[in-house]
Image (cartoon, grey):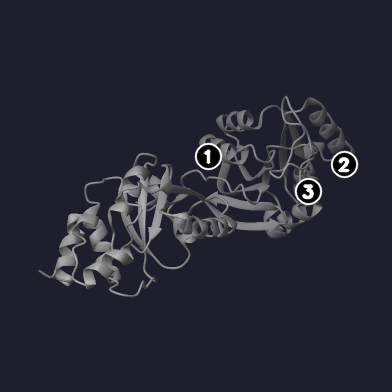
């Protein structure tokens, strides 16, 4: 979209895969075809202008004014000359400087734009940082859009109160159409700025191995959501979904930063809906690693913005599994030492131990 310029003080701009990214007319066309007539008469801010390809296209599509921001002096000079040749200087301004600083200055000056364009170097985190700067500056007009480009794996973290209205992918490149949310924030979303992890599973029932993973996760994250899958039937002696949730809530009542929730469908969809940036899992043996490796790879494909953190089980709990606890209990054995007290009571009530 913007030219392949050198970022300040360094090497050529490169994709996450290490290759120079050429200007894509396909992406530019897709962007403006998506906007359609909406762009007519709009005020546009192009924060990483380069050759100005994006902003110039906005003028061609009917934008009334475009402000270009470019760090490189030679690029800024060439852009002014290009606008002059095209007869567009009267409705365009070229500012030389840092994009994030420019957003702040324009916002303080009372400037507001209907469309803000972001095409920073890939793999730098600048999309996320730019979105935060735009949100803080107030430079996005009510009802406005930010359109950000990046590698599809580098989905940005959104400022609180913003949402992705649309996402499009063109090969390795993704476009995110971001706007301020027009709905009130829920209590869950108010914690979106915190580091949130999701620990998914069936927890049928929860045991000391699960609890150990949760305690370790609490030290690393501001909020941990223990997510109980509704649509999993583990077979022999399985507890009802409501019982699994109740046992978890009883066992975790002493941990104020841990929430118990339920979900159906894809784990990644649930995690993203709750503002999580990480999935956590426990590993007991080599077989677990093989399974979780495949799961992690698939989740990465489905949701590139979600990481997976694997906790190696404490040797004391490495042999414990929910299915083993159920099997022992069904046969009248005592598994109370492997589970929290609240779970031990339920096991005893459901399968009284044989004397």
In depth, the one of 218 and 106 nearer the eye is 218
Q: Residue at x 19, y 59 (%)?
A: 336
Give the label, 2 or 3, closer to the camera.
3
As drawn, the label of residue 294 is none
Left or right position of 247 against 217: left
**Spatial separation of the CA atoms under disc 2 and disc 3:** 12 Å
Q: Identify the residue shown where x is 62% and y is 52%.
A: 176
> Outermost residue toward the front?
355
Label 3 or label 1, whichever comes before in sequence order: 3
| Quarter of image, res 97 | top right
25 over 216 or under it: above or below: below
Please state if 236 lies on the left or on the right of 163 as rendered: left
Pointer 1 residue: 135
Mark 2: few, some, or many residues within 10 Å (few <14, many ≥20)?
few
Is residue 339 among the parts visible in the rendering?
no
Q: Quadrant of residue 351?
A: bottom left
Answer whether residue 168 is visible to the viewer in this image: yes
Q: Is residue 269 left or right of residue 245?
A: right
Graded by Cα atoms within 10 Å as few (under 14), some (14 to 19) or many (20 or more), the crowding at tag 1 reads many
Q: Which residue is mark 3?
A: 57
- Which residue was labeled with disc 2? 86
Real-space CA distance between mark 3 and mark 1, rounded to the nearest whole angstrom:
25 Å
Mark toward the viewer: 1 or 2:
1
Q: Position of residue 235 (x, y in %)?
A: 34, 75
Mark 3 residue element: helix
Mark nearer the N terminus (1 vs 2): 2
Q: Is residue 245 above or below residue 92?
A: below
Q: Tell which of 12 and 296 is nearer to you.
A: 296
């Amino acid at each position: 979209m913007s030219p392949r310029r050198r970022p300040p003080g360094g090497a050529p701009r490169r994709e996450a895969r290490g290759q120079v990214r050429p200007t894509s007319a396909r992406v530019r066309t897709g962007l403006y075809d998506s906007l359609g007539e909406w762009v007519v008469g709009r005020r546009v801010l192009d924060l990483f202008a380069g050759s100005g390809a994006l902003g110039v296209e906005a003028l061609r599509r009917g934008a009334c004014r475009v402000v270009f921001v470019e760090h490189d002096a030679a690029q800024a000079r060439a852009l002014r000359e290009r606008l002059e040749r095209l007869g567009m200087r009267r409705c365009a301004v070229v500012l030389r400087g840092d994009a994030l600083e420019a957003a702040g200055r324009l916002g303080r000056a009372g400037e507001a734009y209907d469309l803000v364009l972001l095409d920073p170097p890939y793999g730098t985190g600048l999309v996320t940082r730019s979105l935060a700067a735009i949100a803080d500056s107030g430079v996005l007009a009510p009802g406005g859009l930010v359109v950000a480009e990046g590698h599809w794996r580098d989905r940005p973290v959104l400022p609180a109160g913003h949402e992705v209205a649309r996402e499009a992918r063109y090969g390795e490149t993704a476009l995110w159409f971001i706007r301020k949310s027009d709905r009130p924030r829920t209590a869950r979303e108010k914690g979106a700025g915190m580091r949130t992890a999701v620990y998914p599973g069936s927890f049928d029932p929860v045991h000391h191995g699960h609890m150990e993973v949760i305690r370790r996760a609490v030290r690393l994250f501001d909020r941990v959501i223990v997510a109980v899958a509704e649509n999993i039937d583990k077979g022999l002696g399985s507890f009802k979904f409501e019982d699994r949730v109740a046992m978890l809530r009883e066992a975790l009542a002493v941990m104020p930063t841990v929430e118990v929730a339920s979900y159906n469908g894809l784990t990644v969809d649930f995690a993203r809906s709750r503002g999580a940036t990480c999935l956590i899992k426990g590993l007991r043996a080599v077989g677990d690693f093989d399974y979780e490796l495949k799961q992690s790879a698939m989740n990465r494909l489905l949701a590139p913005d979600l990481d997976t953190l694997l906790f190696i089980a404490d040797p004391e709990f490495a042999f414990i599994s929910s299915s083993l606890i159920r099997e022992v209990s069904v046969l009248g054995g005592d598994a109370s030492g492997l589970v929290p007290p609240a779970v031990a009571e339920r096991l005893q009530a459901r399968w009284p131990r044989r004397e």
